[in-house]
Image (tube, rainbow, N blue to C red):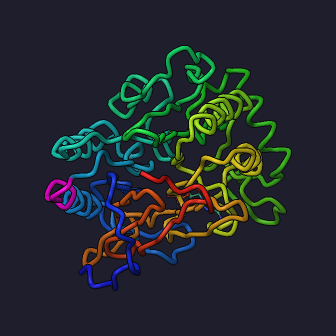
Amino acid sequence: MDDKPDPGPLSESSELFSFGVIADIQYADLEDGYNFQGSRRRYYSHSLLHLQCAIEHWNKESSPPCCVLQLGDIIDGYNAQYKASEKSLELVLNTFQTLKVPVHHTWGNHEFYNFSRDYLTNSKLNTRFLEDQIARHPETMPSESYYAYHFVPFPKFRFILLDAYDMSVLGVDQSSPKFQQCLKILREHNPNTELNSPQGLSEPQFVQFNGGFSQEQLNWLNEVLTFSDRNQEKVVIVSHLPIYPAASDSVCLAWNYRDVLAVIWSHECVVCFFAGHTHDGGYSEDPFGVHHVNIEGVIETAPDSQAFGTVHVYPDRMVLKGKGRVPDRIMNYKKEKAFHF
Ligand SMILES: Nc1ncnc2c1ncn2[C@@H]1O[C@H](COP(=O)(O)OP(=O)(O)O)[C@@H](O)[C@H]1O
């Protein structure tokens, strides 16, 4: 199944560590279905078998990954309709229990179709306990009002998990001021009666199934990246929603993707940004040398294929080795920014 050519010559330098990536499992105990347009088949129950295969692969690696990044939408919204949200989540999380390394969970729209933000905060999908704190830098501590944190899986490498539904009408108490504020933003950009429809929009990302980043979260991100720049760290950012138009269907972008890009582009340290949501995947290197990688969704992956990857980290680059429909990618660090160990 993995008969793709090698991703090009690798330099003599040795691998420092690796990590796994997987997106949009969207498990449900249902017959196959289709996406909204009817153009992509969705394999709701087979997605669990895809996850099991990915975990078996990571567990068997001679040099195991340091962790796995689960990019959100772990179970499908249909579970809520069938009152199966908790049962399905338990099944998928029990499968993740067989993984021998930690998993970091990101939250996507389907998390909010099934659960409230409060429920998620108190659930096993909250992996903030895996965060690292920076002593004497309280400005790098995330607030409790969004689900985001950072951690250091290997010296000089910082991973940041972002909350792309910090500003959203999903999962928020409808009587709260935040809900009213988010609904106002959404309505200002989307006059459609059906707020999930991007029809006629000049900014098609303003749909109900997307969300955005609050100024508070962006300020926090800026502080963490400032610390990373100063300490010559390499940074990997993870979010359910993509932020770079050339790597994604425009309907799938975060509402205020430009604001996140502006923060990232004002720093040197960011190597790559991993997202899910766009089930067809995508990749682009932006003009500032940041690699945007959208991982193909498990839910739209046929039983005879696969959709996950392992990223191998070297002193001068990261190499994504994809399985099945996830392509290999070489992500060189910005010029002059390679580590010389
Ligand atoms: N073009 C559209 N017009 C109206 N509703 C839509 C449109 N695209 C998606 N939706 C609705 O938005 C919700 C999320 O869409 P879905 O494709 O299931 O999201 P995801 O890709 O995250 O699985 C669903 O309820 C779907 O019916």
Horizontally, residue 286 falls left or right of residue 30, namely right
Q: What secondary structure is the magenta-colored segment mainly?
A: helix
Q: Position of residue 73 (x, y in %)?
A: 44, 49
Residue furthest to the front in view is 341
Res 315 quadrant in image: bottom left
Quarter of the figure with residue 188: top right
Toward the viewer: 243 or 230?
230
Please say whether residue 72 is one of the residues in the magenta stretch.
no
Seen at 84% across and 63% down, the residue is: 202
Q: Position of residue 295 (x, y in %)?
A: 46, 63
Q: Position of residue 142 (x, y in %)?
A: 57, 24
Left of 109 or right of it: where is 126?
A: left
Please provide percent x and percent y for residue 36.
Answer: 55, 66
**Is 77 rendered above or below residue 3?**
above
Dividing the image into four equal quarters, which quarter contains ligand 1?
bottom right
Closest to the observer: 121 or 270? 270
Residue visible at 26% across and 57% down? 51
Tell which of 184 and 294 is nearer to you: 294
Give the residue drawn at x 77%, y 44%.
186
- Which image quarter holds the N terminus? bottom left
83, above or below 123, in the image: below
**Image mark count:** 0
Residue interval drawn in magenta: 56-63
Relative to 317, does residue 194 appear above or below in the rendering? above
